[in-house]
Image (tube, helix red, strand yellow):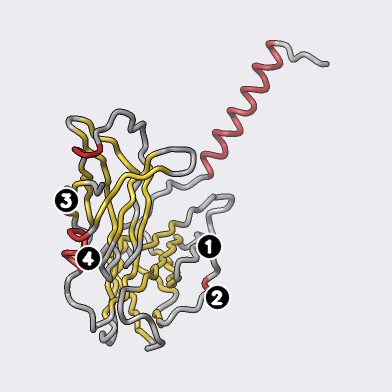
Amino acid sequence: MTTITGALARHAFAHVLSLALVLCAWVVPAQAALVLQGTRLVIKSDARDSIMIIRNTGTAPVLAQNWIDDGKENARPADIRVPFVLTPPIMRIEPNSASNIRITYTKEPLPTDRESLFYLNVVETPPRDPASVNVLQFSFHTRIKIFFRPASMPDEAATAPDKLTWKLVRAAGGKRQLEVTNPTPFHVSFARIGLVSGKRTIAAENGMVAPFGRSNFALVSDAAGLQEGQSTVQYEAINDFGGRRTLNMRLLD
């Protein structure tokens, strides 16, 4: 077995460091320039069109590729079939200016007793400068929820978080989880979930619960010693406009 001497090791380290510095010099600063008008989009079934405004806050033009998916995040846009027409699929947005994405429902049948969930994708890529060679460029992918809401449903999305019920359950392996049940026809998204017992708060994973569905959120630390009968769940629900509201709910037995 060959042993590298101290001098040889220092030489190898210096070579690697020099190469890393050169590579860093080729990388352009990575910072997203496009900002979407909202963090979610609600589309009513009787709306003729829905609009999402995108603003370029950078100092250079940006190309944006736009599409809608039905939950298959890694599917190619060409392979996705959704009941919407999105225009334009590709746009150039000048610096310090804005453009609109227009989404039209094509009237293909969707459930009428609950919301349906889709996602709007926007990938931004700075136009390549022909004078810049050997430069690594970054693309930024933004993906937000689209809630398709039948017009026949009552206008009660804002009160859906109040109707959730929670209980503490055991998952495989005995670990504790919070299980939420949603009796409403609306999706409810969470920014934060915590289990509160006395002066102790145990954070849980967060996410979303579907209409008439259940979701489980694992506690991020040990729940040993909790008094379940005196514990509550504190959660931040996200509304149609991206705002947050904090609620407290007692656990079910």
On the image, the x and y values in percent for residue 143 come to: 39, 62
Disc 1 to disc 3: CB gap under 8 Å: no
Extreme residue in the front direction: 253
Q: Is residue 93 above or below residue 209?
A: below
Q: Which residue is mark 3?
A: 247
Q: Nearer the viewer, mark 4 or mark 3?
A: 3
Q: Which residue is mark 2?
A: 78
Q: Which sits earlier in the primary sequence, circle 4 or circle 3?
A: 4
Distance Cα–Cα, label 3 vs label 2: 41 Å
Q: Residues within 10 Å of mark 4 (few under 14, many from 20)?
A: some
Q: Tag 3's secondary structure?
A: strand
Image-quadrant location for residue 184: bottom left
Residue at figure coordinates x 50%, y 53% from the top left: 137
Distance Cα–Cα, label 4 vs label 2: 29 Å
Extreme residue in the right direction: 1
Residue 25 visible in this rendered orientation of the protein? yes
On the image, the x and y values in percent for residue 24 come to: 52, 39
Distance Cα–Cα, label 1 vs label 3: 34 Å
Distance Cα–Cα, label 1 vs label 2: 12 Å
On the image, the x and y values in percent for residue 178 come to: 33, 46
Residue in front for this viewpoint, 72 or 1: 72
Q: Which sits earlier in the primary sequence, circle 3 or circle 2?
A: 2
Q: Which residue is mark 4?
A: 240
Residue at figure coordinates x 23%, y 48% from the top left: 235
**Residue type pointed to by label 1:** Asn
The reply, left or right, for residue 23 in relation to residue 203 is right
Image-quadrant location for residue 182: bottom left
Q: Tag 1's secondary structure?
A: loop
Q: Which residue is mark 1?
A: 74
